[in-house]
Amino acid sequence: LNATFGNATELIVAIFALQKGLLGVVQVSLLGSILSNTLLVLGCSCIAGGLTAAQVKFNQVAAQANTTLLQIAILGLVVPTMMESVGQLSVHGTVDLLLSRTISCALLVLYLFYVYFQLFTHRAIFEADSKDSE
């Protein structure tokens, strides 16, 4: 849930920017957020872990779930781009909007499933991980 509400400010800024028609600002902001979260945060975590411990333990189930969600999110970004580049999709067309909304809804549903998975069905796995780190 920390990751969900940690990006609330980005979501609020994106909503106001979209209302003013600043789609480019929202796109660049999302790209920056993706790059900073995947590269900067991951890199700093790896460096900090390597400096503090000779061998770092991680939760394999959580890592697999996060990796799968990341790959699906990447597909959600790549598929429309590929369709547009091969001429199957016109930018700002009705099919483009429908595809974008469908992918967005699918990603939202998958994220809600992940939160349910983390908080209810596999709670013990994630609680054991947080107790080990303390």
Image: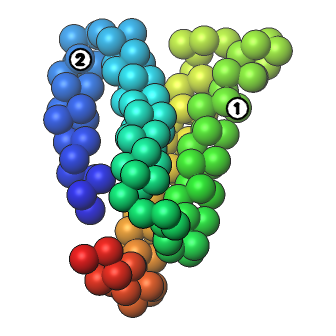
Q: Specify the farthest residue to the bottom.
A: 124
Judged from the image, the secondary structure of the residue bearing numbered disc 1 is helix
Q: Position of residue 15 (x, y in %)?
A: 23, 28
Q: Which mark is residue 35?
A: none
Can you say whether 22 is above or below 66 in the image? above
Q: Residues within 10 Å of mark 2 (few under 14, many from 20)?
A: some
Q: Position of residue 99 (x, y in %)?
A: 60, 33
Residue 134 visible, this angle = yes
Q: Is residue 89 visible?
A: no
Q: Is residue 60 above or below residue 107?
A: below
- Residue 111: give x, y in percent of width and height: 44, 58
Residue found 52% across the figure and 67% down from its top: 55
Q: Residue 85 appears in which quarter of the rendering?
A: top right
Instruction: Say left or right for 5 vs 46.
Output: left
Q: Residues within 10 Å of mark 1 (few under 14, many from 20)?
A: few
The kind of residue on which mark 2 rests is Ala
Pointer 2 or 1: first along the chain? 2
CA gap, disc 2 to disc 1?
A: 25 Å
Of helix, strand and loop, which one carries label 2?
A: helix
> Does residue 28 appear left or right of residue 93 in this picture?
left
- Residue corresponding to mark 1: 79
Q: Which residue is mark 2?
A: 17
Instruction: Give whichever of 42, 6 is nearer the camera.
Output: 42
Which residue is rendered at x = 23% and y = 17% of the image?
17
Q: Amino acid at mark 1?
A: Val
Q: Quick one: 101 or 73, which is closer to the camera? A: 73
